[in-house]
Image: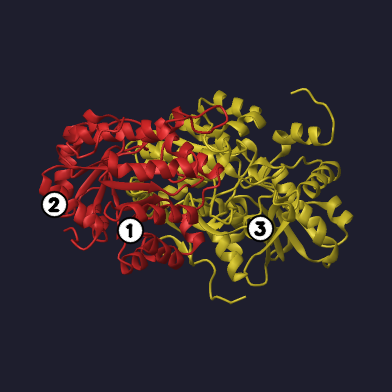
Chain colours: A red, B yellow
Amino acid sequence: MTNPATRIGKRFAALKAEGRAGLVTFVTAGDPDLETSREILFGLPGAGADVIEIGMPFSDPMADGPAIQASSLRALKDGMTLKKTLELVTGFRDTDDDTPVVLMGYYNPIYIYGVDDFVADARKAGVDGLIIVDLPPEEVDELWKPARAAGIDFIFLTAPTSDDARLPVIVERASGFVYYVSITGITGTRSADIADVGAALRRIRKHTELPIAVGFGIRTPEQAAEIASVADAAVVGSALVDIIAANLDPGGRPKEGVAEKLLALVSDLAAGIGGAGEKVA
Amino acid sequence: MTKLNTYRAGPDEAGHFGIYGGRFVAETLMPLILEVEKAYTEAKDDPAFWDEFHSQMKHYVGRPSPLYFARRLTEHFGGAKVYFKRDELNHTGAHKINNTIGQILLARRMGKTRVIAETGAGQHGVAAATVCALFDIPCVIYMGETDIERQSPNVFRMKLLGAEVMPVTAGTGTLKDAMNEALRDWVANVDDTFYIIGTVAGPHPYPSMVRDFQAVIGNEVREQMQEAEGRKPDSLVACIGGGSNAMGLFHPFLDDEDVRIIGVEAAGHGIETGEHCASLTGGKPGVLHGNRTYLLQTEDGQIIDGHSISAGLDYPGIGPEHSWLFDNGRVEYVSVTDKEALDAFQLCTKMEGIIPALEPAHALAHVAKIAGGLPKDHLMVMNMCGRGDKDVFTVARLLGIEVSE
């Protein structure tokens, strides 16, 4: 069940009331630079993003594909750090107090930052949830316990390989929503068959009442619409990150209008799933 | 140091050595890791599995490798009696084959029909490609583009053996990126693929499984030294990148309190320069590639590439059991620079007629530092874990000699 007291809970309840699925967008903090990243982030709710996932850059994102690894490396090259990522969220919260922000990434930068400091600073910044790719239930407690105590949701990944024995182990600690990775593979590669996704979601719903967001391989408004017909939300990441990669000058600096182009795709995606995004030029 | 009753009981059920080790992988990989663990737990208790392993060790690998008394170097150092464990005489020229034989037998037992592996210097890649040729299993080796350039003879060997070598351009194109890419392949090919990891690192059960296969080294040393000298060695020395040859030599002796154990990391240009591969002496604990262990990293927790003259030691992490043995003090960890290793490489070649790989040349450089100060009845065993054929061009270049490849 969603918790009506949290931004994530409120947002999914509102989506349910509207009778539509949500759009979850992923971009990496600081990609390609802090200023452009801020412009994109601040524009996402207006373009129709219902939940915002922000990638915490990591040098070795082993479960992600080339597009997202490249985005991490662009951000790191420009000097992005976990501290600056949290400051970015703080700035965002000054302009938007409703749209849930979920930080996604790998454990090492958090471990080095210090778990308790990270949880305190993330809460203060207005972070609503965490997806830590390389913390399966077996290893998660050292971050999960303090995060939940601070009221931060912990979103777990489920995959086609998560069987009926594995699912209860995963959803036991889940809150906010559950993320279904629709393919056995890395981000931004292939797309899943909708019938397979539907069957998988029915199986997961036997184990949890939390909303389910589906990601990996969703690139177009049509694919988003298809996923939205069976899921509670569709997650789009690599397709957005690719727009940044395609709009850099030879020195790696963003060309004019990259944020607008990215936000235009977000509003198309939102329109695809019947979202309320305003049309961005 | 805090004394424990045993140093050989780890890991616990979840794969932890103290705070190190574990299973820090994406959920997509968890079912595979659990499947490998279950299969290995069963195989470990099956005498037939070990019979086949030891038969392959004897007839294919050529074990036991000799324990050789290095007479001239012993006289040269003027102290401890220095023995070499000659794992460079194994088929394929290094200790890596001990592990790949073990893992391919497990892969077959699990009914897997495709193998992937990562490689840095190419030694593990060659060892993996070799066992895949032996058992007729398709094999894909991930190798960083930078390493492919540096290690072209090994790339050719792998291809001759029938393996597909996939260049990795992501990240910095080195061993850590090759490992990332192999993990990605595994996530995408969950049903038929077995991942042969090359060292005592990665998610549980790999660190302890690879250790168990490599422990053949230390077990042989115990018997051979008994035969040669009628007692145990007094000290053990081995080089460490990921740490599999060292763990193989050390582990059987961890509870022999009177045996001094020393691991030698690569200090590259010197720890103080920041250009090194000494995860323990120059890094700090973190989480990468499925385990918590000491890592080379920035203040912000980003992984950094190490530097070493030896591509086989060029990994920003180290096996988690080494991290644990470092913290509890059972094993001493020291480091040796490129220059010291290069000197030892030449010394060994000239005085023993053995061209060592640059990896064990690091161990020998430390032996050279301490052997002279030890009594003449001190029995020291150094693991000669690889032969230097692969390194002659690198060494020639560093000595300013032109050799056409």
Residue matched to label 3: B282
Q: CA distance from mark 1 to mark 3?
A: 31 Å
In the rendered structure, find residue A206 and report the number of the disc placed on it: 2
**Quarter of the rendering containing residue B283:** bottom right
**Quarter of the rendering containing residue B147:** top right
Quadrant of the image for the C terminus of chain A? top left
Q: Position of residue A255 (x, y in %)?
A: 48, 30
Q: Position of residue B159 (x, y in %)?
A: 55, 25
For the residue pair B179 and B17, the one nearer the viewer reads as B179
Residue matched to label 1: A137
Q: Are marks 2 and 3 in contact (CB under 8 Å)?
A: no
Q: Amino acid at mark 3?
A: Gly
- Check if mark 1 and mark 2 are on a common chain: yes
- Check if mark 1 and mark 3 are on a common chain: no
Residue B189 visible, this orientation: no
Q: CA distance from mark 2 to mark 3?
A: 49 Å
Q: Are marks 1 and 3 in contact (CB under 8 Å)?
A: no
Within 10 Å of disc 1 (Cα), the crowding (few <14, some 14-19, many 20+) is: some
Residue shown at 44%/56% (left/top)? A86
Mark 1 belongs to chain: A
Residue B47 visible, this orientation: yes
Residue shown at 59%/53% (left/top)? B298
Q: Is residue B72 left or right of residue B210?
A: right
- Kindly state the secondary structure of the residue where label 3 is placed: helix
Mark 3 belongs to chain: B
Q: Amino acid at mark 1?
A: Pro
Q: Is residue A115 left or right of residue B364?
A: left
